[in-house]
Image (cartoon, rainbow, N blue to C red):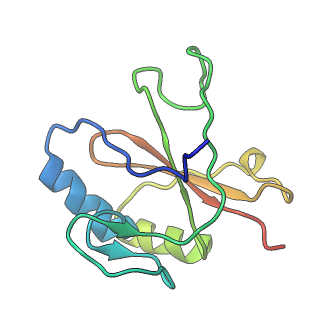
Amino acid sequence: MGVLGIGGLFFRARDPDALSAWYKEHLGVGGGCAAEGAPGELNQWLWLTTGGPVVFQPFKADTDYFAADKQFMINLRVSGLDAMLERLRGAGVEVITKAEWDHPDVGRFARVHDPEGNAIELWEPPVK
């Protein structure tokens, strides 16, 4: 079919510069950031990631899985979820976890919100 993967995620923000800085500081996401072991050369536009699964799934319009006034929720694949959550909490970021979100065949989940209220689901896939 020719599609190789997601090439970017673009969304509106009241303060794009501040929101970009928040994502870089707290999650290591955005231009000039790289996941550990990611190939390529850093530059101001690219976020270098490692390969892995990506879920692309529309939800019903009336879902309660994320806020009704938001059209999307970002899901970030992570490693070392516990350490990440400890660091986020230490920085004053509210972290939400629910036992029913976790499943040994799917992985573990947590949720945070950026300063503009966008949900960010953190997903640690199971180690196989």
User: Residue 43's image quarter?
Assistant: bottom left
Instruction: Indicate whether 14 appears above or below 71.
Output: below
Residue most extreme to the bottom = 37
Instruction: Indicate whether 60 appears above or below 11.
Output: above
User: Residue 90's image quarter?
Assistant: bottom left
| Horizontal side of residue 50 vs 33, given as left or right | right
Residue most extreme to the top = 62
Quick one: quadrant of the N terminus?
top right
Percent x, y of residue 35: 46, 76
Percent x, y of residue 7: 42, 52
**Along the viewing direction, whichever of 8 and 63 lies nearer the viewer:** 8
Instruction: Indicate whether 59 appears above or below 88.
Output: above
**Along the viewing direction, whichever of 124 and 6 lies nearer the viewer:** 6
**Along the viewing direction, whichever of 67 and 13 lies nearer the viewer:** 13
Rendered residue at 29%/70% (across/down): 25
Rendered residue at 76%/53% (across/down): 102
User: Residue 100's image quarter?
Assistant: top right
Instruction: Indicate whether 14 appears above or below 111.
Output: above
Q: How many marks?
A: 0
| Horizontal side of residue 14 vs 31, given as left or right | left
| Horizontal side of residue 118 vs 12, given as left or right | right
Rendered residue at 78%/66% (across/down): 126
**Along the viewing direction, whichever of 86 and 1 lies nearer the viewer:** 1
Quick one: quadrant of the C terminus?
bottom right
Percent x, y of residue 109: 65, 55
Rendered residue at 40%/21% (across/down): 69
Percent x, y of residue 21: 21, 62
